[in-house]
Amino acid sequence: MTEHRTHTLTAGDLVAVFRPEHGMLGISLKHRGAEILRLLDDLEEAAASGRSVGIPLLHPWANRLDAPRYAAAGKSVTLDPESPWLMRDWNQVIVHGVPWSKLEWRQVEGTDSVLVSRLAWNRPELLEVFPYEHEVEIRATLDGTGLTIETTVIATGGDAVPVSFGYHPQLGLPGLSRTQWQLDLPPMELIELDELLLPTGRREPYPKVDRLLADTAFDHGFALTTPSPTMSIAGAGRRVSVDFLSGYRYSQIYAPPAIDYISLEPMVAPANALVTGQGLPIVQPGERYTAVYRIRVEAIG
């Protein structure tokens, strides 16, 4: 088994653990000793396969592309679907960018409450997948209310950089079946998906949700329509929320039926944005794009 160095953050009732040089992966978030994150049973298998566990960054794109090619910021790219630097879903659709376990991060700061790591996107195998030289910096800050993750893409080369990253935090409520989780979602726009879970281009209003998750299955894309919205699950004396603080205008919600986790996913751009150009921010050389979200955990009566 490969050993990977960890860094622990502590504040109040919360303890968070990251692998700062191994995908900058969040591998634990405990509230009063109880684990909030899910799918942590076999981190080494997850690293080998690239599957999402804990709190992974999805970069340079979140969710799916509808073809092994895209054109963005003045460049056309053809991908090799069989490349080990890409991931594919059960339909063989390219998904989630480069596997988190293949990204070589460097820790630049670490205290009891703050962890900062950086990724240089300049290796040939990375530029073959996404030919835009840049750096990514993740700053994770833990305080008594939650874990705040600030992610910045910096265009360090001579080219503009399209920005389409996201996160896939796997969350759950300790000691309570998902059928009893109270789900709270803001009003949004539902992004219609086809049978391959790719956007069709159509959207429709999606009203606020405040009900039990029960056996509802989610694998849906959304456009956020209110400033700094919050999504949450609550029960058994806890509420776990994802606060979209800045820079995230889209989300994917993933909650397979009969499995006790839900992913409330912050996304800078919608799925397939590198292909469609829809909602895709472009960072000019020397400039940066920053997005911030928080996983907030609180005791409730």
Image: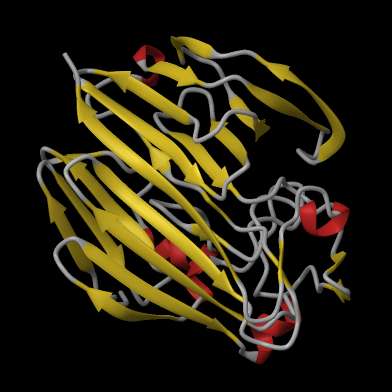
The percent position of residue 157, horizontal first and vertical second, equals 67, 87
Query: Where in the figure is residue 235, as x and y percent of width and height?
Result: 28, 17
Q: Is residue 38 visible?
A: no
Task: Specify the quadrant that holds the C terminus.
Answer: top left
Left or right? Give the position of 74 relative to 241: right
Work out whether 250 lies above or below 232: below
Residue at (32, 79) in percent of width and height: 107
Query: What is the x, y in percent for residue 257?
Result: 52, 24
Among the 4 quarters of the image, the one containing residue 236: top left
Q: How many marks?
A: 0
Q: Nearer the viewer, residue 46 or 224?
A: 224
- In the displayed structure, would residue 143 be above or below residue 206? below
Q: Is residue 268 above or below residue 151?
A: above
Whether residue 278 appears in this view of the structure is yes
Q: Quadrant of the N terminus?
A: bottom left
Tell me how the rendering is colored: secondary structure
Residue 126 point in image, percent of width and height: 65, 81
- In-image side of 234 versus 194 (left or right): left
Q: Residue at x 38, y 24 (%)?
A: 233
Lateral position of residue 51 relative to residue 106, left or right? right
Residue 46 falls in which quadrant of the image?
A: bottom left
The answer to which of 133 and 43 lies nearer the viewer is 133
Q: Residue furthest top?
A: 211
Which residue is found at the position 73% from the left and 51% from the top?
A: 64
